[in-house]
Image: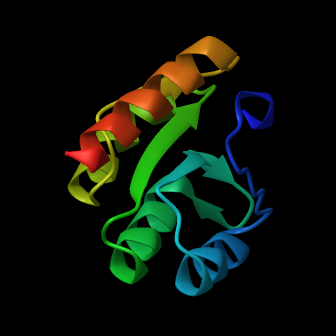
Amino acid sequence: MEDEGYYVKTAISKDEAVEEVSTERYDIVHVDLVLPYADGVAVCKEVKKRSPDTEVVLFSGHPKKLARHRSDFLNAGGRNEILRKPLDGEEIISITEKILKEKKR
């Protein structure tokens, strides 16, 4: 994504991600469903609480877990576009561009 001109910041934990959106403005957060000590749904809830205008996109390599948690993620304010691992760079860019266009309206 950086090669396409996007600013990318990586957080290695839920707490770090939440701290980032509490102190800096982000248009989009991409989050994995499965994280150490948390999950993407919990991250989404905290991000949306602190930064309601930040869009959250979920990705996962666990189809069964994704099926179980999808509605929770959407109810937490996450985007309907959900990415599956292995991630496709073009798909990430396409979704990112779509979201940014929507935000400009």
Q: Is residue 98 left or right of residue 6?
A: left
Q: Decide: is 48 above or below 63.
A: below
Q: In what quadrant of the picture does the C terminus appear? A: top left
Q: Decide: is 65 above or below 17.
A: above
Q: Decide: is 100 above or below 66.
A: below
Q: Is residue 25 left or right of residue 16?
A: left
Q: Is residue 37 visible?
A: yes
Q: How was this image coloured?
A: rainbow
Q: Residue at x 45, y 30 (%)?
A: 97
Q: Position of residue 25 (x, y in %)?
A: 52, 72
Q: Decide: is 66 above or below 84.
A: below
Q: Residue at x 69, y 54 (%)?
A: 35
Q: Is residue 60 left or right of residue 101?
A: right
Q: Is residue 88 visible?
A: no
Closer to us: 63 or 100: 100
Q: How many labels sit on residues?
A: 0
Q: Position of residue 19 (x, y in %)?
A: 64, 83
Dividing the picture into quarters, in which one does residue 1 lie?
A: top right
Q: Position of residue 23 (x, y in %)?
A: 60, 86
Q: Position of residue 89 (x, y in %)?
A: 68, 18
Q: Residue at x 75, y 57 (%)?
A: 9
Dividing the picture into quarters, in which one does residue 100 lie?
A: top left
